[in-house]
Image (cartoon, helix red, strand yellow):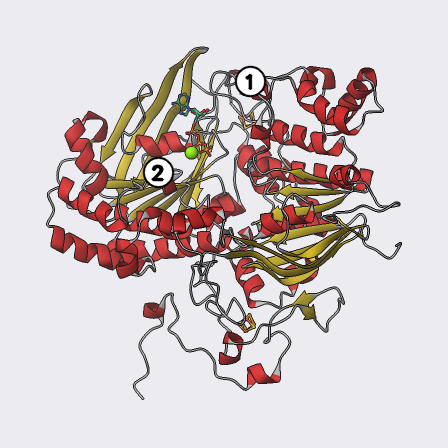
Amino acid sequence: MSDDPLLRVDDLSVHFGGNNGILDRFLGDDKGVVRAVDNVSLDIGENDVVALVGESGCGKTTLGKAMIGLQRPTSGTVRFRGQDIWKSDLEPGDIPYKEIRKSLQMVHQDAGNSLDPNRTIFKNLNPALKKWRPELNLVERRELVHQMLDTVGLTPADDYASRYPHQLSGGEAQRTVIVRSMLLEPDLILADEAVSALDVSLRVNLMDLLLELQEMFSTSFVFISHNMANARYLAGRADGRIAVMYLGRIVEIGPADEIIKNPQHPYTKSLLWATSGLSEINDPIETPPVRKIDIPDPENPPSGCRFHTRCPEAREYCTSNTPDLSGMSGPSDRHEAACFDAHDRIDYRNSEPLTDDLDIDVADDAEQPAD
Amino acid sequence: MATQHTKQKMPDEPTAEHNVLEITNASVAFAMERGDARVLDDVSINVRRGEVLGVVGESGSGKSMLADSMLDAIDSPGTLTGDVVFNPPEGGEPIKVNDLSKEELRRFRWERVSMVVQGALDSFNPTLSIGDHFVETLRAHDYDIQEGMERARQLISDVHLEPDRVLDAYPHELSGGMKQRALIALSLILDPDVLVMDEPTAALDLLMQQSILKLLSELKTEYDLTIVIVTHDLSHVARISDRLAVMYAFELLELGPVQDIVMDPAHPYTRELLNSIPDIDADLDEMASIEGTSPDPLNVPKGCSYHTRCPLADEQCRTTNPDLIEVSEDHGAACFYTDEARETIPLKKEVSK
Ligand SMILES: Nc1ncnc2c1ncn2[C@@H]1O[C@H](COP(=O)(O)OP(=O)(O)OP(=O)(O)O)[C@@H](O)[C@H]1O
Ligand code: SF4
Ligand code: SF4
Ligand SMILES: [Mg+2]
């Protein structure tokens, strides 16, 4: 029991569509199965921070929701302190569902819209407290709300508590929603693009706030982001990990610093290419390090390694064999990648490079030599 | 209104030949319940032929208002005052854009200055195929359809899409990145001189964003375009831009070559903004947000609009609004204390030259 991590995701898949899925209705056939999450395994420890990054539609939000019990998996399990969160018959000694749901909270992308515009901030925060912390009376609830508003810098707290959502700036609304999830003292918070809606000049503040709360309450955090710089900031400061997703799979995971400075998967490298810092303004924009800029149709994902249609390193072998996520030999034993090239597999080395034309910029590559 | 600073006002840049668009004292006002809102305040800026001009600023700073002004496309009830003048590249009479008739404007907006508006992904008609959009546009402007569709196919492959597939597709069948590229192709169909793009990549992934910027720089060379890109993300456009214009609270605070703006900005706001960007290369401990928030249009502070957040603000700043003055060649800032700003607000990121 004590060996169990806070949350263990094991071989988890979530498929949408098929016979009665919503996608079908407008596709009009039953081929439209989207494997939003495909055989993902991941452990989240106590006090752990993981940033999930990837392109839109790669399955980040679906994986996150499945992890906290908001999305039923098609197969595989999610265990909270060792207990399957979808287990149907509870036995004596099991953690009650209510307890699990309270322990796993989410902060949404468009935080502002999730506040009721017709209620004051206190009245927005009160119902959840009443439901999940029934032991508290009104005075204690008010006290707690004020304390938390104070903690996140919404001071004077009694002023903010009596405001309506439209009287808050975007950043303040975002902090209010964070307060709402923290009030329940959860063990894990899933924050879905919670930072990117804010102005650049305010992001660092909000990220610092999240990190402070994480430390103060020893809460574990899963951050979903399409932005490598934000992921690095959050995971880097908390000594956490970055997990990179592509078409339903985690293709690389490791300590933030390792992923940024020593990426192993060609897809991670392409995301980092796209995140050029200000130090590079004097260099012209290079050609993207992928063979195609568009993501394949998720209903019809490529065989073998799913990145092979875009990967600059792809070889014949990658089209029919699927690489597993496995440990890199290197400074960190927590660094794993799913790529034959990264692991220098001999079958991969011996097969032919894929030879389709580079999608981009062929014209720029000067004249062909005459020979 | 005499101000005591000794530096020069930004000299009027070159001449009509160099400036494809000349915007002088542009202001936009909306009548609102709580009073008149000035959402663009007396902005003057020239767009030079062949450049990429990046317009950056936080949400609500008036970037879109400036972009819309370039085509006299402010939604009524908003009103634009000031002058917007277009100088045809082939020579001839300058066109005063805000004097054009409705019909003249309609042509101007496709043939002279074309725009991809913010949130444009929804601007395709869902009941028409992508090809229909091209045909409709050509027809509405009395262009030869066959010839025009040849150009359409070329443009579509220029943005790395397959013409056969994309022309027959309906908008919902394309991903966000494909739609955005199809829109860029459509906006170029009548061969405009200037392309104005408002947050062209905001809804897209980083990889797609960068790829689109790369495409734009290719299109610029191929079609001899002048490009204006409006964005909240400075680090994103820095590499493609020749000059950057920094907006804050509906005003232009700083303008200059991108190297100057990023490596040696003169305005306190620009300096603090650069320090606040979560940059991939920067030291984690050195990033810090700017305290406070930007003003709302009904409540812009008197004097310098940044004084409520500026560490250098003094009495003069609280009462007098500084003009944009030249701080070095071709580089202007609207601040009384640019030397002090450079001394007291160090830049935390190193930019390699
Ligand atoms: N139709 C309108 N009526 C009243 N105010 C408006 C209207 N349209 C825009 N505004 C206001 O004008 C100001 C400037 O808006 P603008 O759209 O130019 O900002 P922006 O810099 O483009 O912001 P963003 O980055 O969010 O797109 C904002 O305060 C906005 O609320
Ligand atoms: S396994 Fe092959 S296709 Fe996949 S990322 Fe590695 S090299 Fe590229
Ligand atoms: S004019 Fe004054 S308040 Fe405004 S930016 Fe300069 S120093 Fe700051
Ligand atoms: Mg805008």
Q: Is residue B342 left or right of residue A149?
A: left
Q: Quarter of the image for the N terminus of chain A: give it.
A: bottom right
Q: To which residue does mark 2 refer?
A: B117
Q: Which quadrant of the figure has residue B91?
A: top left
Rendering coords of residue A29 (x, y %): 41, 55
Q: Residue at x 26, y 41 (%)?
A: B114
Which label's residue is closer to the chain start, 1 or 2? 2
| Residue at mark 1: C-beta within 8 A of ligand 3 | yes
| Mark number, residue B302 | none
Q: Residue at x 61, y 35 (%)?
A: A202
Number of dots carrying numbers: 2
Q: Residue at x 61, y 17 (%)?
A: A164
Badge 2 crowding class, 10 Å Cα cut-off, few under 14, some 14 to 19, many 20 or more, is: some
Q: Chain of mark 1?
A: B
Looking at numbered disc 2 in the image, what kind of residue is underneath it?
Val
Q: Nearer the viewer, residue B319 or B26?
A: B26
Looking at numbered disc 1 in the image, what kind of residue is underneath it?
Arg
Q: Nearer the viewer, residue A58 or B331?
A: A58
In three-dimensional space, the C-alpha distance between marks 1 and 2, rounded to whole angstroms, equals 36 Å
The answer to whether residue B247 is visible is: yes
Q: Taking B147 as reference, is A264 above or below it? A: below
Rendering coords of residue B98 (x, y %): 23, 27
Q: Nearer the viewer, residue A4 or B115?
A: A4
Q: Taking A221 as reference, is B212 above or below it? A: below
The single residue placed furthest to the bottom in the displayed view is A371
Q: Is residue B22 left or right of residue A102?
A: left
Q: Taking B307 as reference, is B340 above or below it? A: below
The answer to whether residue B191 is visible is: no
Q: Is residue B17 left or right of residue A101?
A: left
Point out the quarter of the image occupied by ligand 3. Answer: top right
Q: To which residue does mark 1 refer?
A: B318
